Amino acid sequence: MESEVSLFADQVTLNALVQNLVYASGTVGAIFVVVGLLLIDAGMVRRQNLFSTTIEKVVGFFIGFATYFVIGFALWAAQYYIMEGATMGDAIADWWLGGGMVNVYAQDVDPDVFPGLNNFQIFVFFLACFAGIVNVLLHYAVSERMKASAYYISCVVATLVSSYLSFLTWGSVGPLTNPGFHDFFGVGFVYIFPAAMGIVFAKKLGARPGYFTPHPRVSGYYPPSIGLAAAGVMTIFAGLPMVILSCLFFFDPEALAVSVTMAEASVGVAFNNYGLAWAGGAITGAVIAYATRKYTYLLLGPLAGYVSGASGFDVWMPWQTFVVALGAPIVAYLVYEFTYKRLIDEHKLIPLFLGAGVYGLIMVGIFKAGTPRSGYLGFEDGDFAFQHAEISLMMQLAGVAAVIAAGVVTAFILSLILERTTGLRVEDGMQVDGLDARFWDIKTDVQTLAEIQEQAATGGGTAPRGAPMGPETRG
């Protein structure tokens, strides 16, 4: 006797499949972003640490990815449960790793119970990638000097805190988004939060040997392949368009798009904003780089432009994005120089995310104030009425303050605990010798400048003529 199976065809229509593919493409884009971030770092760290820094980022990514599946998505999804009169506890029951909505086929669930289930299930994978990206970015701030065990513990905690921040600041009906905080791409919880953690960790860990002052065995920090880092930047550029598409919601009529913030949007304008953000940042970054003869700004420029525009890709018009992006590298430049002069050994997250990211969120609050958003389509009155709130500068500042405070407090508490347990900093001798050789017994087949100079100092060889002997000359 054949068993009867209830099939809810409305969950698996062709229209539903098209939306599923749109959101699934965002996961591919997110993975390209991870690859780009790995390439950038591989082109910038000391050759003696190349394997260790790369593999720590990969492991940190998957720690965040798995932690998000366990409970992170349930925290973000809770805002929509609360909108419907349920609780965060109900969201956790449905969406933790063993929850009923995670472990069921969409066609077996009545649309009256949960419509569009496939899209929500795909969103778990999509947002889990960004939970992992938060950890990859955090590693940029502690690379080559934080113990792997301390970093991995920090990855679990950072994922949990950033997941709760996404509930507060990314969407349309969360505690900060429903009153009007606007962040289309999640700049706050994905970018600014790990940067705020990076400030604390960079101060606690101190500078790497030989970075700011001469060291007898580390003559400087010489990037092994700037070209590889440039390729990483363009890999990120290639991956993000599909991510942007996944930050739009599509309602009937089938091609009608609104952003995750429930602001009016369209695919074409969002994509054009994205491209012009990179272009504007690249142009100003190039001007700064050639004026100062520091190659760093050729890489920071386009990234700064993108980060400054990302929070408003849905509401900016293309010309506005371009103008905002032109100013972003200047902000990054000022922050970079400020941190360098104060001997803070962190020059990626702080200029880009605390500099350009905060700048972009504030620009949205100033120039797009009054733009309708928040709530959810289909709600005509009440606390969650569609587009009942407006963008405002005060809400933008409140959101920025929340994510920065969360990052600083999280890293400060973690530092206190880790210093007394696993330890926080890799000891100087291991940093000097290189993590790959000391921990993994991996030795590069390229003789570095520091090794040549050390041989010369001990009578084992001759230093090359004109070799720089001081700390790194900055790009």
Image (cartoon, rainbow, N blue to C red):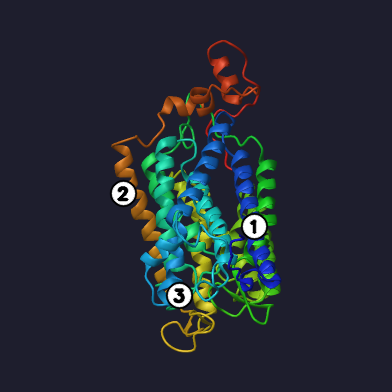
**Which of the labelled discs sits on residue 7, or is there none?**
none
228 is higher (above) or lower (below) than 96 = above
Sequence-first disc among 3 and 1: 3
Q: Which of the 4 quarters of the picture holds residue 276?
A: bottom right
- Tag 2 near tag 1, CB within 8 Å: no
- Under circle 3, the secondary element is loop
Q: Rounded to the nearest whole Å, what is the CA distance between mark 3 and mark 1?
A: 32 Å
- Relative side of 350 to 247, left or right: left
**Which of the labelled discs sits on residue 173, or is there none?**
3
- Residue 100 shows in this picture: yes
Sequence-first disc among 2 and 1: 1
Q: Which of the 4 quarters of the picture holds residue 441?
A: top right
Residue type at mark 1 is: Pro
Q: Position of residue 274 (x, y in %)?
A: 66, 66
Q: In this rendering, which labeled residue sits more in front, label 2 or label 3?
A: 3
- Under circle 2, the secondary element is helix
Viewer-closest of 399 and 105: 105
Residue at image mark 2:
413
Q: How dense is the environment of label 3, judged by Cα within 10 Å: few (below 14), some, or many (20 and up)?
A: many
Residue type at mark 3 is: Val
Residue at image mark 1:
302
Q: Position of residue 325 (x, y in %)?
A: 62, 66
Q: Residue at x 69, y 72 (%)?
A: 15
Q: Rounded to the nearest whole Å, what is the CA distance between mark 2 and mark 3?
A: 30 Å
